Amino acid sequence: MPRAAGPAKAKGAAKATRRASGPRKGSGRRAAEALALIQATPGVTIPELAVKMGIKKTYLYTVLPDLERAGLVKKDGRGWHPASAAAATA
């Protein structure tokens, strides 16, 4: 018996999914940990943060700009500072 006509599907093709709405990246536990370390050690660099947190630098290169857009931290040269401290030194 022939198959019914219809759109062809590749065997094992993944269904397209959308990212669930909710908090943006950088709003989780690791972001809070990074923020606390920046507040404790103003001027800390991403490689230094990665070592202290035991994670890869690439994650922080995504998270810290999100924290900066949220107004929580500021970048000065290579180092990161709490936004309030950065405003006080500017």
Image (cartoon, rainbow, N blue to C red):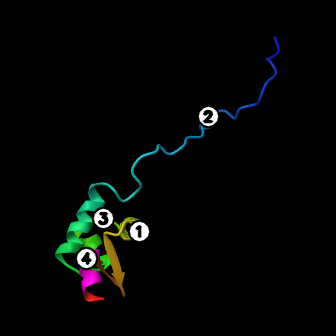
Looking at the picture, which amino acid does disc 4 mark? Ser
For residue 32, above or below residue 72: above
Residue 48 visible here: no
| 4 or 2: tag closer to the N-terminus | 2
Q: Distance between the residues labelled 3 and 4?
A: 26 Å
The residue lying at 28 percent from left, 59 percent from top is 30
- State which quadrant residue 38 falls in: bottom left
Q: Where is residue 19 in the image (x, y as percent from the top left)?
A: 50, 45
Q: Give the range drawn in magenta.
A: 83-88
Looking at the picture, which amino acid does disc 1 mark? Arg
Query: Which residue is disc 1 drawn over?
Result: 69
* Labels 1, 3: front one: 1
Query: Which residue is disc 2 drawn over?
Result: 12
Residue 84 - label: 4
Q: How far apart are marks 1 and 3 (CA)?
A: 22 Å
Number of numbered tags placed on the structure image: 4
Query: Which residue is disc 3 drawn over?
Result: 55
| 3 or 2: tag closer to the N-terminus | 2
How crowded is the residue under tag 4: few (<14 C-alpha within 10 Å), some, or many (20+)?
Answer: few
Looking at the picture, which amino acid does disc 3 mark? Ile
| 1 or 3: tag closer to the N-terminus | 3
- State which quadrant residue 65 falls in: bottom left
| 3 or 4: tag closer to the N-terminus | 3
